[in-house]
Image: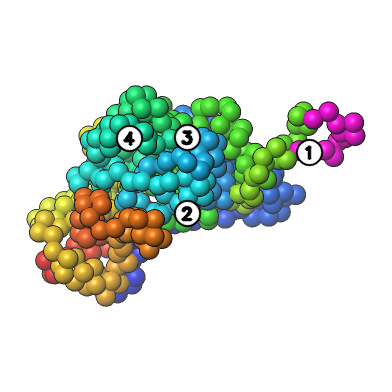
Amino acid sequence: MHHPDHFLPYGRQTITEDDITTVVEVLRSPFLTQGPAVPAFEKALATKVGAVHGVAVNSATSALHIACLALGLGPGDRLWTSPITFVASANCGRYCGADIDFVDIDPETGLMSVKALAAKLELAERESILPKVVVPVHLCGTSCEMASIAALADRYGFHVLEDASHAIGGRYQGEPVGSCSYSAITVFSFHPVKIITTGEGGLATTNNRHLAQRMAELRSHGITKDVHRFERKAAGPWSYEQQHLGFNYRMTDLQGALGLSQLQRLDEIIAERNRQWQIYRELLSMLPLQLLAVPEDVMSSLHLAVIRFADPRPEQHRRVFDELRAAGIGVQVHYTPVHLQPYYRTLGFSEGDFPEAEFYASNAISLPIFPGLQEDEQGRVVNILTKHL
């Protein structure tokens, strides 16, 4: 049994002896970076999700940035995303000098509303302000309605960039998230609270060779070893060319090796998270709240277990949140709507712009869910909720 007073975070990595051995092997090898581990990880992950190419970087934020650049996003262009996400889903567009706008969420799932997207696109077409890139966010590891979004992309001519930071190992209509069947590029995160970890780290999958090559160059200073653009009289074995203004967004071999080791356990981790979610469903069924819905045709990776109260009152939300924290349960709100962050307010957004997102944030709490979480620990969480509801 666990001591009743120990702290339960909402998410936590699991590191096995195999993971440690794998990383130590890299430390003893000649390559700490730009060696064989990262390409091996890219290949294994792309294969796992059914994509042709994988491009690993030092964070999902970097992956979103180079994905936007590879898609040609720049000043005068528009990127649309969900207000209920981490700020990076929107910031990546700002890094490119693009304008940002948001699409309100579906109150049942917390995901970008296809209905709201369709209505907003119709309006934007009339005003000639269509987006160049739309970033659906797979909140909690639950895939957005990608077939409908792809159909709208065909109709209105925008690129789809899936922010699957939460969703490695998830499925949509039986297909792995990341296969890019409905998008140009999909981005994953491997931050320690996520499904599998590389410490910090991210990866973009795509089925388009040009996008993959462009992202690979952008992550490494825009440099290529192929000296072909200019006639070089002195081109020697030392030559390289900087074709674009790139960045240093590389993933190290230590991280790649850790990712490869963790990837072996992905299916078990997803199964365990789904079991824990079902346990919550049963334990919470008598309380006046519900877990965020997962659509029928989706297998969520359940990165987060989000509850919302049946009788939403801000004071109750705050009280229950505080009581859980006081009892050593590291609950969190995912997320404060991005458009209400001080930086985005300076760009002209304010309260009332995206009512569903704002209502959701005033009424959502993420409960602990992670590999190794025990049923009695989930019981402890539910007991505190029961006591205060």
Distance between the alpha carbons at the discs numbered 2 and 4: 40 Å
Q: State the residue at coordinates (75%, 49%).
A: 30
Q: Which residues are magenta?
A: 230-241
Q: Quick check: 287 above or below 220?
A: below
Could you tell me which secondary element the residue under label 1 belongs to? Answer: loop
Q: Nearer the viewer, mark 1 or mark 4?
A: 4
Where in the figure is residue 63, as x and y percent of width and height?
52, 44
Earlier-in-chain disc, 2 versus 4: 4
**Residue tagged 2:** 191
**Residue tagged 3:** 185
Earlier-in-chain disc, 1 versus 2: 2
The chief SS type of the magenta part is loop
Where in the figure is residue 55, as x and y percent of width and height?
57, 39
Earlier-in-chain disc, 1 versus 3: 3
Q: Is residue 73 left or right of residue 304?
A: right
Q: Residues within 10 Å of mark 1 (few under 14, many from 20)?
A: some
Whether tag 1 and tag 2 are in contact, CB under 8 A, the answer is no
Q: Nearer the viewer, mark 1 or mark 2?
A: 1
Q: Outermost residue toward the front?
A: 127
What is the three-letter code of the residue carrying label 3? Answer: Ile
Q: Nearer the viewer, mark 2 or mark 4?
A: 4
Could you tell me which secondary element the residue under label 3 belongs to? Answer: strand
**Residue tagged 1:** 240
What is the three-letter code of the residue carrying label 1? Answer: Tyr
Q: Is residue 323 left or right of residue 75?
A: left
Q: Quick check: 180 above or below 9?
A: above
